[in-house]
Image (cartoon, grey):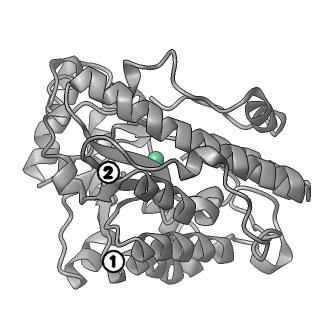
Amino acid sequence: MKKVLIVIFTSALAGCAMFQAPDSITKPCDGPVKQVAFVVDDLPGVVLGQHTKSDSTGLKSLRMMNKNMVKAFARHNVQAAGFVVEKQASIVKEETDQRTALLELWLKSGQILGNHTYSHLDFNRTPIETYKTEIINGEQLTAPLLAKHGQKQKYFRFPYNQTGPNDATRNELKTFLSTNGYIIVPYSYGNYDYVYNEAYKTALDSDNKELAMATIREYLDCTAKMIDFEEQACLDYVGHPVKHIFMIHINDINAKCLTDILAMFKNRGYSFISIDEAMTDDAYTPHKEFGGLTPIGWLRKNTQESVPRPSEKITNMCRKKGKRFAKIN
Ligand SMILES: [Zn+2]
């Protein structure tokens, strides 16, 4: 999650017809057993874009994102794990109940919720005692919701995938998380969704529907290429078909495209598994390079040079808005 303005999003494309999927998205399935679990970071979401009078705090937009993504997972019988940044649920005081209700939507649909810290701080730049407090503060709204739905706080993901500045700090936090009943959730790859989302919002904010649709087409095409690329790259690196953990964020472009992304996996012969099942893969075994923590994104790290990427046009659309563009790591 990047630092953003909380604003309104007028869904100019909400009622538009579905676009033509690129050929690469409908590639037929073949080869060995393919499995994938899904993690969604930054619930209940942040809203990029222009303020509008009808949604001055972004609540309507957040409702749309959460409802669409929950619906897409349910339609494909996927149990995803959503990671909560509780500050985003209470950032507009008078909307805390409504924003908390958006988190409960996930639980009502059978999805899992985990902790992504209270305010999404970077562990590499945060004193460990502050970071521990962030983790505990990140449980305040979520823990009662989980209890109500028969779950308990179990899963943790590091914001920005930053696991700490050195081995001693990592080990201390690992012990803290374990003592508090947490499992650190890694991922095998993502799809630059936050970059495409910024470009998509830039197009919408300038009322350029054609550009917004072109951005969606490229996003889906890049995601399709990413799935094929990482499937082979991880197989080559690990030596067996990996139980993938695909990491995305809650945002506008995924609210629009998640159904198509899930269909891509399905059309390629993937079955959808839980995060627990995925983490039985020894590809995620804790590694000394990470101070004994479960590696995060390390499969991708070893294929950084040749991995599919957003086009220059997309990255320029982000830069024009003066927003931060960062690599997935
Ligand atoms: Zn995050």
The percent position of residue 88, horizontal first and vertical second, equals 52, 62
x, y percentage for residue 234?
32, 29
Q: Residue at x 34, y 50 (%)?
A: 134
Which secondary structure, mark 1?
Answer: helix
Judged from this view, the residue extending furthest toward the right is: 207
- Most foreground residue, 134 or 115: 115
Kind of residue at badge 2: Val
Q: Nearer the viewer, mark 1 or mark 2?
A: 2
Q: Is residue 153 visible?
A: yes
Q: Are marks 1 and 2 in contact (CB under 8 Å)?
A: no
Closer to us: 276 or 168: 276
Q: Position of residue 9 (x, y in %)?
A: 76, 67
Classify 20 as above or below 28.
Answer: below
* Above or below, comparing residue 149 to residue 18 in the picture: below
Instruction: Give the left or right position of residue 25, taking residue 238 as reference.
Output: right
Where is 249 relative to 163, above or below?
below
Query: What numbered label is drawn on residue 212?
Result: none
What residue is rendered at 42% in x and 19% in y?
A: 303
Query: For this view, does 27 lie left or right of residue 16?
Result: left
Q: In this figure, which residue is indicated by the disc labeled 2? A: 36
**In-image side of 141 versus 329 (left or right):** left
Give the residue at x 72% y 38%. Answer: 323
Query: Dot 1: within a 10 Å radius of its alpha carbon, few (fewer than 14), some, or many (20 or more) residues?
Result: many
Check the picture and name the quadrant holding the C terminus. top left
Q: Residues within 10 Å of mark 2 (few under 14, many from 20)?
A: many
Mark 1 highlights which residue? 107
Q: Which residue type does callout 1 highlight? A: Leu
